[in-house]
């Protein structure tokens, strides 16, 4: 009768009182470690007592040989606990960061301590990214030193297109300068895309392969040297290059779009009390079509890389009743502005809402407006100001009251303080690509970096003792 693998397993563990596997190893200095050490020591001491003759067994821990047995049992228990902790480190997902970088990383890159540059393990920010990288490197090492493996290995830390060429494959080409003498020589070529602005329309578009350069190319070069040293055959010689095209052909507009999210954007890391998005119903596409404004909102916390989504009007996606079949109502934000044009020396007429203040203001480059004949300390908290003509014509939210008696427009500045100048809020976002149609009254949504935008949350009268119970 054949014995199944399950029948080969012991009915009881080899070691007494073995701890359950725990992704977070517990130090022997803690309460759990001391308790586990004491329990295992008692188990081993009882095992010693069971195998001794009856004349040596004593129930009282006073005899000298019992103390010796106890010391030996405690030493064996410490060895068992340390062995279990080492066993926990074999899983890349749960290994401690210092063990991950120093031990597991050294196993994947055994030449990291050599004097040959570059020394050390790959330079990667964050242990989560490094864990994923190491797991993929394990798979590549098991696949063998093929050209496909080396191409994928070099491409782990870059979005550029990687091409590994064996020179011997071109030795039979009469137009090639390579021959059989180059059979152990390979080329590693990286081609990236650059972003360019059309001088005629001002639209930003993505160029062809070979028109861009990777981010931090020196660091990428050092990391790829380490990767190739780990997965390439010992006899192979590699020439590493970033390729560029020498001339541009006909310019084109790509229909593809890309969204980049921060690595720390996982849901389990988010700050639940932070803002997730800003939305509104009165979005306006301004004249140059790369500026999107809403005078009732403050976009101060919108960071570059956020996404603007338009849900109504001609600039929405076709499924939302719009006409934007190119970007589908989604645009990448490059930055935020206070004014569409900038400072002006000419006075411009204005009116505020809901207070109804009127007059003429001069506009500065920093987004502040001034009327020496007006006292803006009487405005409401959500007051907006409408500049009625000029290149900066539009409606803007008042953010700060300036001057010796000024402050944020949150009701903290007393009325009658003689404030003659106010700072406008950042109510305009600049997009990477032009929006098709100049229009108003659009519903929209702009995503925010939740970890970077937090507001105080005061809770009074809540019993928090349940949060401290073990």
Image: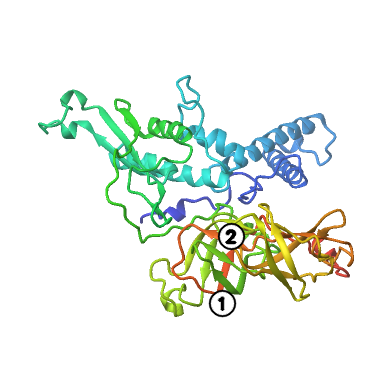
Give the mark nearest the N terminus, 1 or 2.
Answer: 2
* The N terminus, quarter of image: bottom left
Across and down, in percent, residue 200 comes to 38, 55
What is the residue that sits farthest to the front in this orientation?
Answer: 346
Dividing the picture into quadrants, the one containing residue 336 is bottom right
Whether residue 170 sits left or right of residue 84 in the image: it is: left
Gap in angstroms between the C-alphas marked 1 and 2: 18 Å
Q: Which mark identifies residue 331?
A: none
Q: Secondary structure at mark 2?
A: loop
Q: Is residue 134 visible?
A: yes
Front-most of residues 416 and 178: 416
Closer to the eye: label 1 or 2: 2
Numbered circles on residues, count = 2
Q: Is residue 278 above or below residue 344?
A: below
* Image side of residue 36 versus residue 377, left or right: left
Q: Is residue 174 left or right of residue 238?
A: left
Residue pointed to by mark 2:
340
* SS type, badge 1: loop
Residue nearest the viewer, comparing 452 with 52: 452
Residue 257 % position (x, y): 41, 59
Where does label 1 land, which residue? 441
- Compared across the picture, whether 158 is left or right of 405 comes to left
Residues 327 and 143: in front is: 327
Mark 1 is surrounded, within 10 Å at the Cα level, by few (under 14), some (14 to 19) or many (20 or more) other residues, namely some
Furthest-top residue in this view: 115
Q: Residue at x 54, y 34 (%)?
A: 103
Residue 317 x %, y %: 44, 73
């Amino acid at each position: 009768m054949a014995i199944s693998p399950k029948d080969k397993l012991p009915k009881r563990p080899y070691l007494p009182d073995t701890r359950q596997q725990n992704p977070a190893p517990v130090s022997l200095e803690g309460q759990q470690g001391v308790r586990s050490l004491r329990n295992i020591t008692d188990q081993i001491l009882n095992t010693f007592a069971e195998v001794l003759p009856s004349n040596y067994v004593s129930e009282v821990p006073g005899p000298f040989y019992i103390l010796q047995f106890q010391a030996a049992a405690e030493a064996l228990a410490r060895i068992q606990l340390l062995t279990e902790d080492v066993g926990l480190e074999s899983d890349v997902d749960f290994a401690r960061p210092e063990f991950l970088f120093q031990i597991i990383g050294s196993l994947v890159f055994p030449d990291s301590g050599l004097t040959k540059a570059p020394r050390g393990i790959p330079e990667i920010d964050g242990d989560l990214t490094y864990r994923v990288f190491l797991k993929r490197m394990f798979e590549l090492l098991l696949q063998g030193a093929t050209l496909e493996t080396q191409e994928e290995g070099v491409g782990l830390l870059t979005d550029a297109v990687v091409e590994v060429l064996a020179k011997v494959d071109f030795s039979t080409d009469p137009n090639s300068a390579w021959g059989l003498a180059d059979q152990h020589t390979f080329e590693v070529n990286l081609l990236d895309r650059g972003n360019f602005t059309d001088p005629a329309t001002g639209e930003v578009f993505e160029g062809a392969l070979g028109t861009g350069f990777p981010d931090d190319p020196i660091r990428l070069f050092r990391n790829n040297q380490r990767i190739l040293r780990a997965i390439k055959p010992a006899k192979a010689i590699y020439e590493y290059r970033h390729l560029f095209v020498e001339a541009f052909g006909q310019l084109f507009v790509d229909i593809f779009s890309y969204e980049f999210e921060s690595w720390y954007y996982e849901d389990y890391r988010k700050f639940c009390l932070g803002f997730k998005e800003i939305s509104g119903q009165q979005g306006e596409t301004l004249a140059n079509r790369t500026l999107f404004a809403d005078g009732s909102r403050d976009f101060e916390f919108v960071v570059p890389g956020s996404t603007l989504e338009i849900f109504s009007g001609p600039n929405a996606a076709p499924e939302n009743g719009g006409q934007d079949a190119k970007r589908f109502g989604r645009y990448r934000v490059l930055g935020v502005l206070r004014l569409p044009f900038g400072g002006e020396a000419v006075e411009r007429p204005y009116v505020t809402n809901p207070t109804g203040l009127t007059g003429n203001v001069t506009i500065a480059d920093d987004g502040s407006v001034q009327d020496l004949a007006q006292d803006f300390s009487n405005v409401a908290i959500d007051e907006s100001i409408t500049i009625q003509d000029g290149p900066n014509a539009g409606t803007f939210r008042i953010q700060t009251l300036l001057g010796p008696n000024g402050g944020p427009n949150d009701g903290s500045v007393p009325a009658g303080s003689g404030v003659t100048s106010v700072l406008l809020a950042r109510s305009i976002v600049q997009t990477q690509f032009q929006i098709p149609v100049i229009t108003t009254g659009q519903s929209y949504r702009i995503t925010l970096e939740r970890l970077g935008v937090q507001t105080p949350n005061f809770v009074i009268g809540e019993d928090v003792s349940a949060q401290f119970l073990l």
